[in-house]
Image (cartoon, coloured by chain):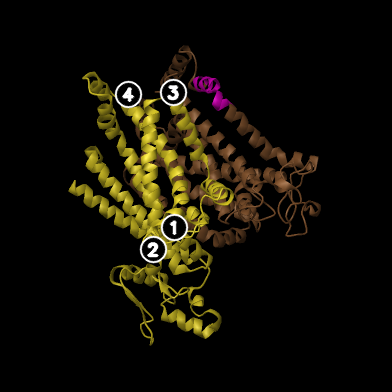
Chain colours: A brown, B yellow
Amino acid sequence: MTVVQDTAAGFQSAALTGGRSLRQIIWARLRRDRVAMICLVVLVLFYLIGIFGPIVGGMVGIDPYKFDSASISDNAGKPVLDWGGISAAHPLGVEWGTGRDIMAQLLFGLRISLVIATSATLITVAIGTVVGIIAGYSGGWTDSIIGRFMDLVLAFPFLLIVLALSGVLTQRLTQLGVPEGNPSRILYLILVLSVFGWPYLARIVRGQVLSLREREFVESAVAMGSSKRRILFTEILPNLWAPILVYATLTLPAYIGTEAALSFLGVGVLPPETTFGAMLATSVTYFNVVPTYLFIPGTALVILVVSFNLLGDSLRDALDPKAIH
Amino acid sequence: MFAYLVRRVLLMLMLLFLLSVSVFLLFAILPGDPARLTCGKACTPAIIESNRHRLGLDEPPLTQYVKFVSGIFVGRTFSADSPQPIKCDAPCLGYSFNRQEQVMSLIARSAPVTFFLAIGAFVIWIVVGLALGIFAALNRGRWGDRLIMGISLIGYSMPSFFLGLLLVFFVIIKWQFLPFPAYVAPWENPFQFFQTMLLPWILLATLYAAFYIRLTRNQVLEVLSDDYVRTARAKGLPERTVVVKHALRAGLTPIVTAAGLDLAGLLGGAIISENIFSLPGLGALAISSIIDSDLPLITGITILTAAIIIFANLVVDLLYAVVDPRVRVI
């Protein structure tokens, strides 16, 4: 036992005498990357807005649920002012027919979009990592069965299945005690994104584990008689954080886009709640007259997704041992 | 190679079997009683029951599944004991009671639209993706590379339906370069066909090309730093030969794999593009079958789509094994 601890300490001190730990090196690389830092700031802002925006919005008096009949005309509910009714009271305009504030909807919609994409990413990472580690370490039959099961999941036409089952499964969730309506619909989105998303990560993790399990520190753990659970989650798992982190950073924006697409096709949340995708879906009816309905949520969506993708790219470069810096 | 081929084909058949069973089980929980859809307003409980029996929907799911599968190979006849049996020739994917038509002929009518959509987009995105990807790799770090990578990042991050709506807004509504899409077959009116398909092609090609530019660039860069490329250069081969014959050929395998799978995915129906441009393809058929709770049609389309993907996986794997013999061991 002490021998191993000594070796581990030896490795650590070697890393330290070499200068910095891996984490420090990566952070230093990232900090030098101006694009990555800008994206990080933008994303932190998005999250802060997602968390506190509705509260602040409530204090300054924008409310996504409040109808403003003065801002829309009696004729078919078209906003009175140009550009979708942009004014001091409604900086991004008002919704057709109800006069609800677009900016407030954007703030509240961002929160739901982020909740869905972030939770789905966390679940995907959890399932993908555990399954990938088990498949990669066990090998043999376990690996084959898990591999074929992943093939099966990946062969399902995702959009078709999700659209076809949304009604029934949302009802099932309600029967299981999830509050009816949007909570069930949001949970459904989180679940389907995770259920169809994990195999990609599991494949990456499995590949990494295949090479890790041949390394000396795993061999020594086996020789010491460590339990399998300990080897998997205490010895191997800490070596996987880099690829998992990169994958998560690139999965989150993909999920934001998919959630928006599903909302666009009518699976997402129902009014008065909204998300970027739902706002874009509503815009289809009116955007030949009021183009801002299309541009405002669309631009917000693209900025969010681009920031995540850029950060993910930078992170991958920073974590790449082959990269020249 | 032969053993590898047999193993892969067996694996594919097993996957197809598992997949069709799971689709059946998944859709067994759907509401929308297919028997209820057979008689419209004239329905009475008695008629529904007799139709249910006629169409074999009162049988246990396992029997229904066996009949479905045998229908694919030898065809089947619905309501055989009634005066008007419905004959469904092999390959029979079921019968839509809602539309009073065989699932296979419904699919056959929509498939060409999706096929033209997918192939057209595929050609554009491969040409653009490879050309720009190679260009970016050869000019790494210069402004051309940065510009291409920047554009491809935005294309890659752009949600498909948002880009589609932007195209509709600017090209059709605001600038009126093109009329609103109305699909016709290319042999009926080639001009209108191209007018209709142009934007959907651009939409899909942009989304995919963005990914292929990045993939090609990474591949070429990786291969260009290999020793044998240095050797090729050292022995004085012209740069063009080095890039095309040595680097590109070696770097092409992952691109071929991705291209095969992406094309297969599209052939199963491009739901969002078809939706935005009102193309009557497989994706649109699938959506309307879901709206109508047309169970046999949903099941048929889902299984067909998944089968295309599984088959493409097989083809890609086999091609891979032909190109790279090391793969066969796995």
> Is disc 1 on the same chain as disc 2?
yes
The residue carrying mark 2 is B188
Q: Residue at x 36, y 47 (%)?
A: B261
Mark 3 on the same chain as mark 2: yes
Query: Which residue is labeled 1 in the image?
Result: B192
The image quadrant of residue A89 is: top right
The residue indicated by pointer 4 is B225
Q: CA distance from mark 4 to mark 3?
A: 18 Å
Residue found 38% across the figure and 85% down from its top: B84
Q: Nearer the viewer, mark 4 or mark 1?
A: 1
- Rendering coords of residue B67 (x, y %): 35, 72
Q: Cα distance, mark 3 to mark 2?
A: 48 Å
Which label lies toward us, 1 or 3? 1
Percent position of residue B294, x then y: 48, 69
Q: Report the span colored magenta.
A: A24-37
**Looking at the picture, which amino acid does disc 1 mark?**
Gln
Judging from the image, mark 2 belongs to the subunit labelled: B
Location of residue A224 by image quarter: top left
Q: Judge whether residue A258 is colored magenta.
A: no
Helix, strand or loop at label 3? It is: loop
Q: Chain of mark 4?
A: B
The type of residue carrying mark 3 is Arg
